[in-house]
Amino acid sequence: MFVFSLIVLLAINSVFAGIFFSELNSKYNLGDTIDLNARVDPVFGDRLLRVTLFCEGNPVIEFNNFPDEEGSVNIKLPLNFNTIEQASGNCYFLGKYSGESRQSNGFEISKRLLVKLSKESFFTNPGEEIIISGTATRLNGNPINGEVEIAIPLLSFLQIELTDETVQNNIQSNNTTNNGDNNENTNNENFTNNELADNNNTNETTSAQETTQQPPSPINFEAGKFYGKVVNGEFSVNLKLKEETPAGNYRVDVLVFEKSDDGMKTSEGVAVGSLNVFHVLKSIELSLNNQNFDPGVFLEAKPNLLDQTGVNIEGEVSVIIRDETSKRAFEKIISSKEIFQYKIPANLTSGYYEIEASSSGISNVKKFFVNEKAIASFELVNNSLIVTNIGNIPYRKDIEVELNGKPFIKKVSLNLGESQKFKLSGAGEYNVKISDGETEMFQDGVILTGYAVNVNAVNEKGFGFNSPIVWILGAVILAIGLLFLFRNIFKKKSLAYHFGKNELELDRTDKIQIGKSSIPSIRQSELEKFTGWQVQEPIRQADQSVVLKGHRSNAAVLVLKIKNKIGRTEKQTLEQAIEYVYDKNGAVYEQENFVFAVFSPLMTRTNKNEVEAVKAAEKVTSILNDHNRKFREKIEFGVGINSGDIINRIENKKLKFSALGNFIVVAKRLAGISDKQTLVTKKAYERGISEIKAEKIKFNGGEVYEVKGVVDHEKNKEFIKGFLNRQNQEED
């Protein structure tokens, strides 16, 4: 009997109970609640189910419960600082009941939130408002309600005023921060690899550091920190940078966190983005090498484009020099920080001038003064010395002429632009030196002829007013003057002022013509004196200026660039060539070594201005090339044609216009690369394609056309008419 009872007791004690756990989520955050159902089978009424939470292998909290009649126990664990002090990492529950133990599936408890920005990079100008937005969720994907702090560390450093007190505080703060950063990095290393793998290698940055910082004070906002709310997992914060924020690429740290009722951070997460602040042109710095300049010297200027913090930035600058009447004397487009030189013409009128540097609507103007100065040029031609006043005031000086060291002092009195000639005489070869104290000229081996070594003005003894030679020359000049009285009374001053029409437009319907010659340059008052009729002079001069009110027209521009220094004969050939521009009703103006001819509908009364420009260019190039074949002194030139829009009107017998876009600049570039041929842009060629014959060439990746000829419809009509007449005669 005893043995049987012992066997029964051993059998009862050998019955083990089974422990079963419900499924748990794989991840939990502080603030979540773990809901665990445990069940045992069989149920022993006098035994406890002991369930212990383990994290990172260490017991955290223990639950002891009697299972109900069905063997079930429900465990709810709110994850907060009141229930557990240290619970993070990989965890599981371990249950023990009636000698049996069972472990639940593993899960993770973390303080980290998943923060994602709507985009990784943000771009803005200083003073503009940008929006940084994104989402924040727990590890299980549930959205949160919390707060967001956006910090721009480099911007904070740049905007804080560095007083002695601030520097001391920063030193102490940096020491504390460095210690905290070391701890934070250590904590982060425990879970960074797993978290990055779980989140598909996103660029979120994690932070597990606990902090008890209070809400930000106003100084934090000024130091580059911005705050906002996270509602239902979404946040959006408006940032407005100061106008003087430096340009650059800034790191943006976005910290999202949740708080408990007592103000402690329960969970937090970090994302990192970038903020690009652009350079914005705020001013132009313009420096000159002097304020007063003598004619003939170089003015040097350097424009600097400055951004919102005074930093030099790259860009193109338009430089214009104007006189007191706002007439442009010089214009050029250069790069910022580039030093450019402008040689002040020797005959430039004395007075105040202004130089303006402008870019993107920002400009800076400085004034400078051109002094009065008498300047002469010396030239030896056929044993004669020619002294010319090239300065901006009358020349009243003594000059010294040395012939093999023998000096001759001569008084010279010249008005603006005037010249005086001296005859050098001697027997043999001489070394000649001419000087007025400022300008000097040397020439060795000059062969002179004569009875004595001397220097005489052409109106001195031996060659005076009573000389027969003077009388003969005077008679010849008078005859020539009478012959061409009605053709060229007043010498033209510029290509842009020349009137080359063969007919004069009169107030009445009649038109007069004297022989086969015209009266192209006669002044209106002189013609009225001879005829009594009022003459309307044709418009031949163009003026590029700011035209606010006028006609918007599609025009063509012909640009002729003279690439070498030319003499008097070459200038006469050039004037003859420009006659054909006037024949096509082009308006002309000059600038440095460029001649510009504008063909506007206001002048030409046609929309085929590209064809008119090409026809004029053919005549110009033909005359200049013919000159180069006949004369030893060549004319190096190039011709470019472009088509574009202008705002123009006729005022004071001038075509005033403002070019839109790079209308003029492109034509200048074509003239620069042209070698004695006519180049047209694609736009100009297409507008006149029915009449312009051209060949396409490649230049810098673009299309340029070289003119080969122009279709002459008039000749075609005459040919057809003649052919038909011959056919009719043959039939008769």
Image: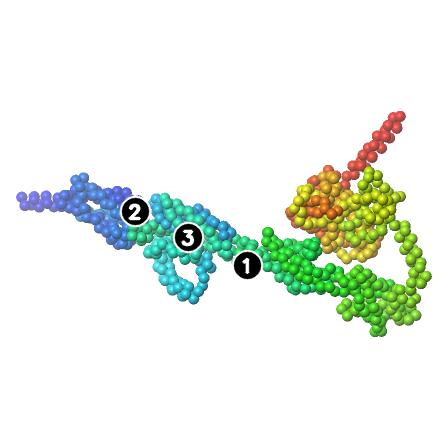
Does the residue at mark 3 contact the one at mark 1 (Cβ under 8 Å)?
A: no
Above or below 367: residue 399: below
* Residue holding disc 2: 32
Q: Amino acid at mark 2?
A: Asp
Crowd tier of the residue under label 3, counting other residues whose Cα lies within 10 Å: few below 14, some 14–19, many 20 or above = many
Q: Amino acid at mark 1?
A: Val
Query: Furthest residue to the top?
Result: 732
x and y, in percent, of residue 354 in the image: 66, 58
Q: Amino acid at mark 3?
A: Phe
Crowd tier of the residue under label 1, counting other residues whose Cα lies within 10 Å: few below 14, some 14–19, many 20 or above = some
x and y, in percent, of residue 307 in the image: 55, 56
Quarter of the rendering occupied by the N terminus: top left
Give the alpha-carbon distance from disc 3 to disc 1, as whole Å: 27 Å
Circle 3 SS class: strand
Above or below 533: residue 347: below
* Residue holding disc 1: 311
x and y, in percent, of residue 188 in the image: 36, 55
Most foreground residue, 291 or 169:
291
Does the residue at mark 2 contact the one at mark 1 (Cβ under 8 Å)?
A: no
* Residue holding disc 3: 226
Circle 2 SS class: loop
Relative to residue 732, is residue 22 drawn left or right? Answer: left
Q: Mark 3 vs mark 2: which is more N-terminal?
A: 2
Most foreground residue, 411 or 280:
411
Quadrant of the image occupied by residue 606: top right
Which label sits on residue 186?
none
Give the alpha-carbon distance from disc 3 to disc 2, as whole Å: 28 Å
x and y, in percent, of residue 299 in the image: 68, 62
Report the residue at 28% width, 46% height from top: 33
